[in-house]
Image (spheres, helix red, strand yellow):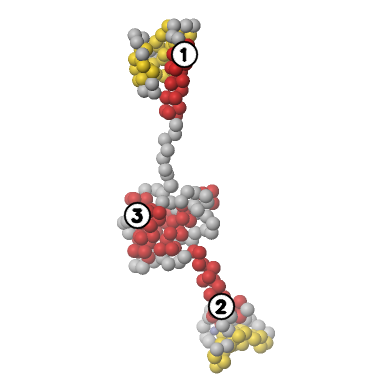
Amino acid sequence: MKINKEILSLPPYISTAWENIVSLFTQANNLIVILKNGSKIAIPNLDSDILETIFSTHIKVLEKRIEPKTSISFGLPSLNNNMGLGSDNLENFAGAMQHNPEQKNAPNIPNEILNKIANITKLFSEEANIDIPEPEPDCNCMHCQIAKAMQIAKGINPENLDAVVADEDLKFRLWDIHEEGKELYSVTNPLDQNEHYSVFLGKPLGCTCGKKSCEHIKAVLNS
Ligand SMILES: [Zn+2]
Ligand SMILES: [Zn+2]
């Protein structure tokens, strides 16, 4: 007699692997074993502790069978096929992915994959005009993680985006702006009084520098 997680052996009635057994039950004094091939085997008069062992072993085998196979899927469709062929593929790859707020707490993409993406981005971003997707702040979805890796690889650090905006603001303040009349402003470079322009915000919008959307107009609009 042998009862373990692989085998149920109760000579002379049965000796088989659990995988051949569909179910067990008792009927009167018999243990009934139903096999996959449909046959039904009755084993009479087993001790109650042997019955207990058989049933508890069967449960363990069943639980092991039902246990979901742990598979790690990062939702990266055929990454290896798409990557490493060229910039077109990189762009398609990035574009195919969408920011998904439901995934904002997704597990981190393994560093080796992020590095791969970053390296390919570096390789191609100079010769090809790749549209790097914008990552959403505080989002860890696949799209945003990849977008972040691509941005960093291209030298745009999303953490520093605020600083870039602040620099832009400083630039506007480089002009002294005075209201000269209705919708008319004088714009003077505080470092060089000879550099001054007149900006008219009425119709037609214009600046004495002659350009249509120059920084002087922007400076007035932002003042
Ligand atoms: Zn996202
Ligand atoms: Zn101007």
* Spot occupied by residue 16 in the image (x, y as percentages of width and height): 34, 17
Q: Residues within 10 Å of mark 2 (few under 14, many from 20)?
A: few
Q: Residue at x 56, y 78 (%)?
A: 170
> Closer to the N terminus: mark 2 or mark 3?
3
Q: Is residue 103 visible?
A: yes
Q: Quadrant of residue 131?
A: bottom left
* Spot occupied by residue 66 in the image (x, y as percentages of width and height): 44, 29
Amino acid type, label 2:
Leu
Q: Is residue 165 left or right of residue 93?
A: right
| Beta carbon of the mark 2 residue lies under 8 A of ligand 2 | no
Tell me the SS state at disc 1: helix
Residue annotated with mark 2: 170
Number of marks in the rendered image: 3
Which of these two is toward me, 144 or 152?
152
* Spot occupied by residue 205 in the image (x, y as percentages of width and height): 59, 81
Please identify the quadrant where the C terminus is shown: bottom right
Q: Residue at x 45, y 27 (%)?
A: 63
Residue annotated with mark 3: 83
Q: Is residue 18 visible?
A: no
On residue 93, the disc is none
Q: Residue at x 47, y 65 (%)?
A: 157
Residue annotated with mark 1: 49
Residue furthest left as drawn: 85
Q: Residue at x 43, y 28 (%)?
A: 64
Q: Is residue 139 left or right of residue 186?
A: left
Amino acid type, label 3:
Met
Q: Residues within 10 Å of mark 3 (few under 14, many from 20)?
A: some
Of discs 1 and 3, which sits in the foreground?
1
> Closer to the N terminus: mark 1 or mark 2?
1
Which of these two is toward me, 131 or 141?
141
Of discs 2 and 3, which sits in the foreground?
2
